[in-house]
Image (cartoon, helix red, strand yellow):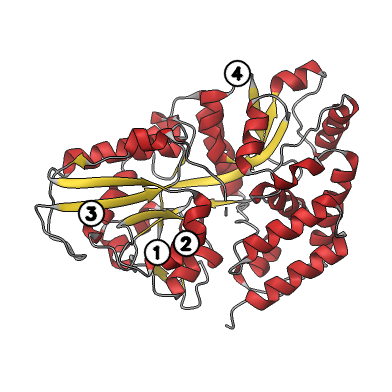
Amino acid sequence: MLTARRRVVASAAAVLAGALTLASCGGSDGGGSADARTLRLWHYEAPNSAMGVAWTEAIKEFEARHPGVEVKFEEKGFDQIQKTAPMVLNSSDAPDLMEYNKGNATAGLLSQQGLLTDLSAEATKRGWDKLLSPGVRTTSQYDKSGVMGSGNWYGVPNYAEYAMVYFNKDLFAKYRLSEPKTFDDLVAAMDTFVGNDITPLANSGAEYLAQQYVYQLALSKADRAWVDSYELYKGEADFHDAAWTYAAETFADWVEKGYIAKSSTSAKAEDAGVSFLRGKAPILFSGSWWYGRFQDEAAFDWGTTLWPDTRLTPGSGGNLWVVPKNAKNKDLAYDFIDITLSKKIQNLLGNKGGVPVAADAAAVTDPRAKQLITQFDTVSDRDGLAFYPDWPVPGFYDVLVSQTQRLLTGSTDPDAYLDALQEAYDKGVPKR
């Protein structure tokens, strides 16, 4: 999804920007001389996130293996890449390698437009096809219509992700609340907080959090066939079915009850994360991409749990490394992807609070990190990764943001909200 999720803070440039003098490697299928080349790399991970730490180390490893090659990391925001990628990738200014959102509406659309390099041969040659599990690999492959799950490889995820309930243990203890193990526990906790003039749920109406609350509520009444119909077009998606109706009505009800603040309409994901970090919001439902940052910055005791009483949760393989069709040094890009999948980098990712896809289980020793991976394994083992709500069709992310904002402010009702989603979805579903 996600999904607009992460922001790079200014210190990312200080950590990674500027040229690193590195070593040359073998011949390139993407142009450039062997003794004076540059790897241009874009990603949008915060420097103290698990991924940011891991990719910084990967650049150092690349340096050791490629003397003579200049590496230029360019700081880009998630929204910036999301909105400008088609234009940039269709120009001579395309980077050699960049992080990009996965799913039909993003990587799938770019692959259909011919803007991404087909990585199928490299995936086989380098063993990426064997290294990644089927569930994680789903978002790597796209067919001729840009639909994920089959076809050629257009991206490589080197971590996984899923959404969970983060809760402030100190605040829960203060109000004599236990970990929310059932949905009724969660609702009871939110009632207690509202009764003490605390808005329980951190939210961002201007970005992805609000729509993911709605999606998770729908998933709690759905099954795998429902997800496959919605995400993979293996059936008809009906936005007035029991799952979507329950989700929209419950979200609107939660706003009225004060579980979610109407004032969060214009808030960004960063605002929601900071409200949790500062102890203002006792609960945040969001992804594992926050985990490392919370480990690093939270000044209180906190825990996580999967959304209670459901088998499905938003999640997938992580964002993709994609190689633009116009990249000048594709072989260097392939080498960098390989390094991010090495045991050294994967083990580091795991211990810093990420969900690695190729780590040594015994090498991940941090207790919180082990819990994070155990929870992911629980979801994965029960086939519970349900992708993200904005994936099915191009432009659907913006529709979900704007329409969920209207539901949040009360300027639309659940029925009209679902009508708007159905109309946008139906217009975007490709002819098969």
In which quadrant will I find the N terminus? Answer: bottom right
First in residue order: circle 4 vs circle 1: 1
Q: Is label 2 or label 4 in front?
A: 2
Q: Which amino acid does label 3 sit on?
A: Leu
Instruction: Specify whether 22 is left or right of 220.
Output: left
Q: What residue type is labelled 4?
A: Ala
**Circle 4: element type:** loop
Residue ID at (63%, 35%) = 273
Residue 38 locus on image (x, y percent)? 21, 52
Q: What residue type is labelled 2?
A: Thr
Decide: few, some or many residues near mark 3? Use Cα within 10 Å; few <14, some 14-19, many ≥20.
many
- Which labelled disc corresponds to residue 84? 2
Q: Do the residues labelled 4 and 1 touch (CB within 8 Å)?
A: no
Decide: few, some or many residues near mark 2? Use Cα within 10 Å; few <14, some 14-19, many ≥20.
few
- Which labelled disc corresponds to residue 332? 3
Judging by the rendered image, the residue that carries numbered circle 4 is 299
First in residue order: circle 3 vs circle 2: 2
In which quadrant will I find the C terminus? Answer: bottom right
Residue 412 locus on image (x, y percent)? 85, 60
Q: What residue type is labelled 1?
A: Val
Residue ID at (74%, 42%) = 264
- Which labelled disc corresponds to residue 88? 1
Closer-to-camera residue (416/371): 416
Give the Cα distance between marks 3 and 1: 20 Å
Residue 431 locus on image (x, y percent)? 59, 83
Residue ID at (64%, 44%) = 268
Residue lying at the far bottom in this picture: please name it: 431
Give the Cα distance between marks 2 and 4: 37 Å
Q: Are marks 1 and 2 in contact (CB under 8 Å)?
A: yes
Decide: few, some or many residues near mark 1? Use Cα within 10 Å; few <14, some 14-19, many ≥20.
some
